Image (cartoon, helix red, strand yellow):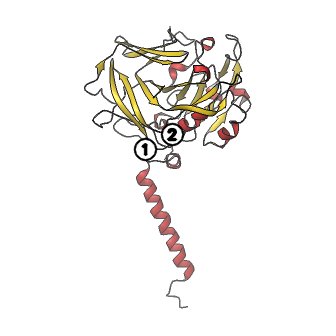
Amino acid sequence: MGHGAPTRRTVLTAAVAAAALTASLAAGCTRQGPSDDGRAPHGSATPDERRSAGTGSVLAVKIDNVAAARPQTGLDSADVVYAEQVEGGLSRLMAVYATTLPEVVGPVRSARESDLELLRQFDRPTLAFSGAQRKLLPLIDGAPLRPRTPDTASGAYYRGGDKPAPHNLYLRPARLMSGAPGRAALTTGFRYGPAPSGGTVTATRTVRYPVARFTFTWSAARQRWLVSMDGTPARTTSGARVAAATVVVQHVRVRTSAYHDVLGNPTPYTETVGTGKAEVLRDGRSYEAVWNRRTATDGTAFTAADGSPLPFATGQVWVVFAKA
């Protein structure tokens, strides 16, 4: 073959290079960074694309929420707090940290199967929890997250003397992560911005589980929803009143999972992928909304009745999963 004709290897090399360039450009078009409308990156960007874009990893901590576990520590520093129903009709919290890592968080308790679906919206989050049912551990180990328990990160946990076990396990986040990843890691799909028009003036809203309840009372002085749990004002060990800028009551399907506790109570599975009704509380008003999360790797979009995005107030967000 003459020197002027391309060899087969040359043609193949050029084809591979062109394909790589095309893939790179396509990935660049779908990758999302912080936007100018107050949104965290979410939507069509996959976890791999968010990782390529340099988005850090949030810290998610499972927090005990029975009376013996209160007051909690570090809850007021969370960017998002999820409240879910667990066995026996009780409640448990998952606090997500991105902009601030408090010195201590707790009490830390066990994980549930539905946590894995909820956390898929983040890029390999660090999940701090006390443990899980033996049959669930392989699922947690195989999930795209960084599980950290006292068995795998003993130096990050300690038992406090303020409460009886098992309600006295605390986490030092700085021993798990070098620093807060920043707001861009909050790939929740939430939008933030000025309050929309309309809504209903609302002074208080209560969400009830079989043997637990959350009440949010609007404080005009603080411009926050003051949180009460089981009828008692929620405070941290520092004395700070727990307060949210935005409260979401998200109506979801809650079904029975394949797991149960030591007493035989079935573990509820909270489905967070799909669509349904919601209520968004902000600025002393309640707004009817529709939530939509297409896949587990997507964030959750909240829209008003007319289909327009429903923005949240800047500050801590509480999402309470209520049975549809």
Depicted 304 relative to depicted 171: above or below: below
Q: Quadrant of the N terminus?
A: bottom right
In which quarter of the view is residue 255 placed?
A: top right
The answer to whether one can see residue 178 in this image is no
Task: Name the residue: 55% across, 11% down.
Answer: 238
Q: Secondary structure at mark 2?
A: loop
Q: Relative to 260, is 274 on the left or the right?
A: left
Q: Give the residue at x 66% y 20%.
A: 170
Report, in whole angstroms, how far the alpha carbon at label 1 lies from the one at label 2. Answer: 9 Å
Q: Is residue 20 left or right of residue 165?
A: left
Amino acid type for the residue under numbered disc 2: Gln
Q: Nearer the viewer, residue 33 or 321?
A: 321
Residue of label 1: 43
The number of numbered badges drawn on the structure is 2
| Front in this rendered view, residue 183 or 208 | 208
Which residue shows up at 51% across the image and 22% down it? 77
Q: Nearer the viewer, residue 232 or 261?
A: 261
Mark 1 residue type? Gly
Which quadrant would residue 66 be assigned to in this image? Answer: top right
Q: Quadrant of the C terminus?
A: top left
User: Can residue 154 be seen by looking at this rendering?
Assistant: yes
Q: Is residue 273 above or below residue 209?
A: below
Decide if residue 150 is on the left or right side of residue 290: right
**Callout 1: helix, strand or loop?**
loop
User: Where's residue 321, x and y in %?
Assistant: 48, 27
Residue on which disc 2 sits: 121
Can you give x and y, in whole percent of width and height, for residue 313 in the image?
36, 25
Location of residue 115 in the rendering, given as x and y in whole percent from the top left corner: 58, 33
* Percent of width and height locating residue 148: 67, 33
Q: Which mark identifies residue 303?
A: none
